[in-house]
Image (cartoon, grey):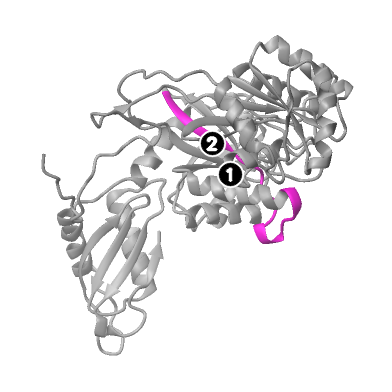
Amino acid sequence: MTDELTEDGWVELPTVDDDAEIDAAGDEVDFGPVPVVAVVGRPNVGKSTLVNRIIGRRQAVVEDVAGVTRDRVAYDAEWLGRRFTVVDTGGWEPDARDRAAAIAAQAEIAVATADVVIFVVDAVVGPTDVDEAAVKMLRRGAKPVLLVGNKVDNTALESEVAALWSLGLGEPYPISALHGRGSGDLLDAVLKAMPIPAPTGPAGPRGPRRVALVGRPNVGKSSLLNRLAREERAVVDSVAGTTVDPVDSLVEIGGETWQLVDTAGLRKRVGRASGTEYYASLRTSAAVEAAEVVVMLLDASEPISEQDQRILSMVAEAGRALVIAFNKWDLVDADRRYYLDKEIERELKRIPWALRVNISALTGRAVDKLAPALRTALASWEQRIPTGVLNQWLTALVQATPHPVRGGRAPRVLFSTQAGTKPPKFVLFTTGPIDAGYQRFIARKLREEFGFVGSPIEVSVRAKKNAGKGDRGKAHG
């Protein structure tokens, strides 16, 4: 079989699922879902620090304050060539109330859905009443449990771990999640406790499309995730800023499975944030970069703020497909709708291409419109215009509206090509630099002709080398 050249002259290779293994014949083999390892324990024993140690990067938000992690948050991990999912949880307490009770419930759900549980105890403090209550909860789950004595930062502290035998979970593993002491032995034990994978046949198509939910604090991101999932996937509280880590969930919307990531609400620019908020901002930026399409939630009952516009700019600059969801529509009356129309016209004029839906995560109003909007935005994000069609259209456009004359001369647009997708990128080859306004004019006409609803597009210029400086300008549309 010969390789076929694409329009751009590149050899197109078969795509391989990142989660698939290759058998001896060179075919992909699906080993089914990866095992799940839940990390649980009372507040502030170092669960998130251990998760970061396991995944090999500082991704879970860590701060020397109890209760930073509130939802169950999944991360991909690998040890000795074996892939698995590690789930970070909030602090579990037996008599928790209000938001703490919701956090504890998330931890219990993580235990129920895990294949292996890592139970973390502070070895320096020793077993507490809360730890003993947690052991009873873990035994009800009937899952393999590995007892970890954390904060054993040196040899002198190893004797402290002996007290953990009293919990009745077998031999404790002394580790220092912060410094990495003993983590290798623990991961070896985790692999032994995992179920043995069995091939389930040829691998299927690539995984679900990745969607990031972003917005200011308390606009209803977690409520929307729970509404779409039809269960409590994320902790919801009237206090702004409940979500800190990105919460990753597989959710079925409109008959299709999507990978939704609920992110922390952004109050400030990353450079001005501090502590937990700083790291949460970094995680949100990373979630946007990793997503294919972003759902930006705005509170329809409140004016569009400067921070809303900053977040929208961040998404557009990241080049992601975008759907703007005006949430809390059940709180919008006729007067508010009038002013909201004016705000959209004024504040969102830089991104008129974004798809908009009016929803209520609380009541479920119009949330079924999200799936069609996401599909439309992604189709635009991946749209490719054939070179012949593009240049036929462009020739007619520049003949009807040529570039203005500057200094007695007008640069000519020779031809164009689409250099890429995700988002669509176009290159104009010209006899000289063209005005930024004319560049934006072409970008606007591209949208009028070919759509690209819900996706940013880039139009750059490549002038002849002897045309002088400024021959590589770029316009976003």
Q: Position of residue 21 (x, y in %)?
A: 36, 31
Q: Residue 212 lies in magenta, yes or no?
A: no
Secondary structure under badge 2?
A: strand
Residue 180 spot, x, y in % from top left: 67, 43
Residue at horizontal 79 percent and vertical 41 percent from the top:
155
Q: Is residue 385 left or right of residue 259?
A: left
Res. 73 visible in picture:
no
User: Please, what secondary structure does the residue beneath circle 1 have?
Assistant: loop
User: Where, quadrant-wise, is the C terminus in this rendering?
Assistant: bottom left
Looking at the rendered image, the quarter that the N terminus falls into is: top left
The kind of residue tagged 1 is Gly
- Residue on which disc 2 sits: 77
Mark 1 Cα shell of 10 Å, populated few (<14), some (14-19), many (≥20): few
x and y, in percent, of residue 471 in the image: 32, 77
The answer to which of 460 and 28 lies nearer the viewer is 28
Residues marked 1 and 2 touching at CB (< 8 Å) = yes
Query: Eyeballing the image, is 110 above or below 311?
Result: above
Q: Nearer the viewer, residue 471 or 16?
A: 16
- The residue indicated by pointer 1 is 56
For marks 1 and 2, give the CA distance.
Answer: 8 Å
In front here: 50 or 425?
A: 50
Q: Is residue 292 above or below residue 343?
A: above
Residue at 34% across, 61% down: 443
Could you say which disc has been placed on residue 114 in the image? none
Quadrant hosting residue 3: top left
